[in-house]
Image (cartoon, rainbow, N blue to C red):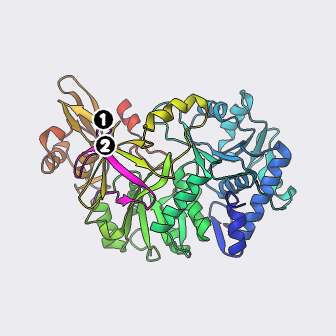
Amino acid sequence: MYIGDYLGRRTIYSPDALAVVDTGKDPGLRLTYAQMNERANRLANGLAEIADIGKGHRVAILAQDGVEHLDLLFACGKLGAIHTALNWRLHWRELQQILADVTPAVLIYDDMFTEAVTELARAETSVQHWIHLDGPGIPGSRGFNGLLAQSPATPRTCETLDEEDIAAIVFTGGTTGLPRGARISHRQIAWNCLNTVIHDLGRDDVYLNVFPMFHVGGLFVYTLPQVVLGGTTVLLKRFDPERVLELIQEERVTVFAAVPAMYQMLTQTKMWTDIDLRSLRFCTSGGAPLPVPLVEQYTREKGIRFKQGFGMTEFGPGLFALSPEDAIRKVGSIGRPNFYIDARVVDRGNRPLGPGEVGELVLKGPSMASGYFNVNNASDWTRVIDAEGWFHTGDLARYDEEWYFYVVDRLKDMFISGGENIYPAEIEAAMYRHPAVFQCAVVGIPDPKWGEAGKAFVVLKPDHAVAPEELLTHLGEHLARYKIPRHIEFVTALPISAAGKILRRELRER
């Protein structure tokens, strides 16, 4: 089989190479490609035996990061089934709605979510088989490790699988309403791997993953390309700044990716000053623009080379890359499109715009998702794909004369004050230049005079104090007056998603 059985193929070439280091286990689990392939075969055979899982069937997992996510992804590839990872931050009633949409027969879960799983088991769902990773599990569930031990390691493949079959359902962030499941095909995975390898990875790389594996950042940005290349992936159960720094040093990590909030937290640990990070070839930042002072701090104090990335659940996820050499020269840019990605900036009439003009970012290429799962969401997909096949991202962007792209803001985050378009990302970038600001987020709130006005939520660095008036004066040195927020609120922390992004909706609701 030329597609789908990723481990089976990689094991032919490098069976004894170190594939995965799962640091969430005690002691840590170190597995070669041959061992990973055996686990995937055992799980595939076990799922086929107990639940008759086959091509097109969904298998759900509700668990923190660990090797079991990869076991399931690769077992599903061998069966032609569909890996369906659930966001463990959701309420069990929200999970029940998602299960009603994707109708999995099997749900794998870890002990941390037993309470939610107990409620789901009492409710009406499609799940017939419950498999627990640790702990006693709910009544009637079986153990994951026991299933592996009892199932044969006989090689398993789905010979009828082709590139357009679906490998995984990955849910969007759900910032408005219930998350929608993007259908990730094997074709999308293959092209994304190629784009990633061209721009980023080498055969000897060691990648530390801190993104949740229910997210494309966790499964597909570097993790799966690493398998295709034969590199090593280090897994951490949940993001922990001190443990991240320890692992980079201990495992001689060469590639690390995170969002700006995570990079900020690393600098605040007690270990930051003395930790040795020289093994890193580069760090990748995505999810939001990386503040310039933070780039300068990493470069000055640790010699870190940064790549800015940009991607999304429905496309890529590897879409743009900014090389380390351009990190300062093209600060704020997401870089140029990856090799097999086409990009435009268009106006409201879908007409292409020229350099320097702000419009919506649209994309075309073979690493686009195959729509949203379930016919109930089909209309949502048709709204983001135009008649010429361009995917409309909902991001406001521009590009310069050298074809470097800049995301100005999300369409939904932009607000209009006194008839002027206001982009929170621009205000935040200026605010980060103040030495007391650790994190910040700007949202638009109703205003009786201007329609909307900006409100900034600010987290200060430890042992720093500043008055709101001083921050407003600072912003006045960088921005036009109409862009300056009318309200500033100091907070101890910003609401952060499992993927490390700021939850602006929660700030608006305040």
* Circles 1, 2 touching at the beta carbon (< 8 Å): yes
Query: Badge 1, how many Cα within 10 Å: few under 14, some, many 20+?
Result: few
Label 2: state its secondary structure: strand
Of all residues, the one furthest to the top in this rendering is: 448
* Viewer-closest of 20 and 472: 20
63 relative to 417, above or below: below
Residue type, label 1:
Gly
- Residue 176 percent location from the top left of the image: 45, 32
- Residue 426 percent location from the top left of the image: 25, 47
Give residue 21's quadrant in the image. Answer: bottom right
> Can residue 510 be seen in the rendering of this structure?
no
Label 2 sits on residue: 346
Q: Main secondary structure of the magenta part?
A: loop
Can residue 166 be found in the magenta stretch?
no
Label 1 sits on residue: 349
Query: Badge 2, how many Cα within 10 Å: few under 14, some, many 20+?
Result: many
Q: Is residue 169 left or right of residue 460?
A: right
Can residue 356 be found in the magenta stretch?
yes
> Can residue 305 be seen in the rendering of this structure?
yes
